Image: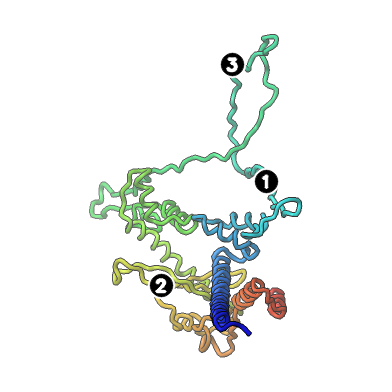
């Protein structure tokens, strides 16, 4: 039989051990919960990065996506290059020796060949004086050929002032007949100081080269010393838009007359006098069909009334991303609303990625994606 003092000490020790076991178990539960949250956040971060860099980034490792995030700006070419190089090992998975995977290097594409239709202007570079004599006998050497290199050159744009002189005629004997003046030539913006080709250049730079009009105004000032108001350039560009309105109307009629239209909308910041210092949210509604043009309709609202007005008499298939504005009362009675499989596919892809990370992959999800891919 134990001594009462020893028994009391052992009882106290036993209680301390049990208390520590409970504390450890509680910390294990808290750690497991924290790890689950961390895993969930990692998965959410990965999905967000994949949405940011596009579908092709799905094969990249978390480390590669993290490296892309550190870049100030990432082009599609850089993403393709990273995909082609293969995934990097994650932290804690370093491999060395013969078993380590080797990164695939894309072969160098070589020097680009310049188009044959461009004019060739030859520029001959002569040898130095010491190269024109033989180093052995001192005789003059002769040209036996050329080492050719082609580079793309350019001639800077030439600006000039076109002075339009319209004849004024009058009869010296019949003063009462008055003065006849030659008609003014047709121009995009008759009262503008810019010629048609200059206005077209504004359009190309703005919509093809993404150069805003205020920057083009600064270029005019820098290169030519012409200080012109921005509103003058704006008015010329708006005039082009006015001339294209009939073309857009014809494109719209062609779309509605067909049997299939894709519709989407995207927001854009708009400056208005009603809200100084901040942008309103405007919307570009886009309507298109394969093999046909794309019609953009700018509106200050994403309301259903915009789609309802455009598709008032349309009786074909309307293909959208499932936005509620297209759900009911859009088009004629025989119109059909088709939703986008690509948008539906994203949810299954996200579920597969999360399941793969958690090692709980579901074959039914992969089967659903395979069926959707066959449709796409």
Residue found 52% across the figure and 55% down from its top: 71
In space, the residues marked 1 and 3 are separated at their CA atoms by 37 Å
**Circle 3 is placed at which residue position?**
129
The colouring scheme, among rainbow, by chain, secondary structure or one colour, is rainbow
Q: Earlier in the sequence, mark 1 or mark 2?
A: 1
Quarter of the image where one finds residue 186? bottom left
Q: Residue at x 62, y 56 (%)?
A: 82
The answer to which quarter of the image holds residue 20 is bottom right
Q: Closer to the camera, 96 or 334?
A: 96
Marking on residue 63: none
Q: Which residue in the protein does label 1 denote? A: 108
From the top left corner, tell me how far across and down residue 114 is, in percent: 63, 43
Q: Pointer 2: what residue?
A: 282
Element at badge 3?
A: helix
Q: Is 120 located above or below residue 140 in the figure?
A: below
Q: Earlier in the sequence, mark 1 or mark 3?
A: 1
- For residue 358, which quarter of the picture? bottom right
């Amino acid at each position: 039989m134990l001594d009462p003092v020893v028994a009391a000490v052992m009882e106290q020790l036993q209680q301390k051990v049990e208390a520590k076991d409970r504390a450890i178990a509680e910390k294990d539960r808290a750690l497991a919960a924290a790890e689950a949250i961390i895993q969930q956040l990692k998965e959410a971060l990965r999905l967000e990065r994949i949405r940011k860099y596009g579908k092709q980034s799905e094969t990249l490792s978390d480390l590669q996506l993290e490296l892309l995030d550190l870049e100030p700006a990432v082009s599609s070419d850089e993403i393709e290059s990273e995909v082609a190089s293969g995934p990097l090992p994650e932290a804690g998975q370093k491999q060395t020796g013969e078993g380590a995977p080797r990164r695939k290097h894309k072969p160098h594409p070589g020097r680009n060949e310049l188009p044959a239709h461009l004019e060739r202007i030859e520029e001959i570079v002569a040898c130095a004086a010491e190269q024109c004599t033989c180093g052995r006998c001192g005789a003059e050497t002769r040209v036996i050929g050329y080492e050719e290199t082609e580079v793309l050159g350019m001639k800077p744009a030439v600006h000039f002032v076109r002075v339009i002189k319209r004849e004024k005629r009058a009869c010296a004997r019949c003063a009462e007949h008055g003065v006849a003046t030659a008609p003014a030539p047709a121009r995009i913006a008759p009262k503008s100081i810019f010629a048609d080709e200059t206005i077209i250049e504004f359009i190309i730079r703005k919509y093809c080269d993404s150069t805003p009009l205020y920057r083009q105004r600064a270029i005019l000032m820098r290169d030519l010393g012409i200080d012109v108001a921005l509103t003058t350039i704006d008015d010329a560009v708006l005039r082009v838009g006015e001339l294209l309105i009939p073309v857009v109307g014809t494109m719209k009629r062609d779309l509605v007359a067909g049997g299939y239209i894709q519709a989407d909308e995207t927001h854009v910041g708009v400056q208005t006098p009603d809200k100084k210092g901040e942008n309103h949210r405007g919307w570009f509604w886009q309507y298109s069909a394969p093999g046909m043009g794309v019609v953009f309709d700018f509106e200050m609202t994403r309301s259903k009334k915009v789609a309802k007005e455009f598709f008032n008499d349309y009786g074909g298939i309307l293909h959208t991303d499932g936005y509620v504005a297209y759900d009911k009362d859009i088009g004629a009675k025989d119109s059909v609303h088709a939703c986008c499989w690509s948008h539906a596919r994203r949810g299954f892809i996200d579920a597969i990625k999360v399941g793969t990370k958690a090692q709980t992959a579901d074959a039914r999800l992969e089967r659903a994606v395979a069926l959707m891919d066959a449709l796409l």
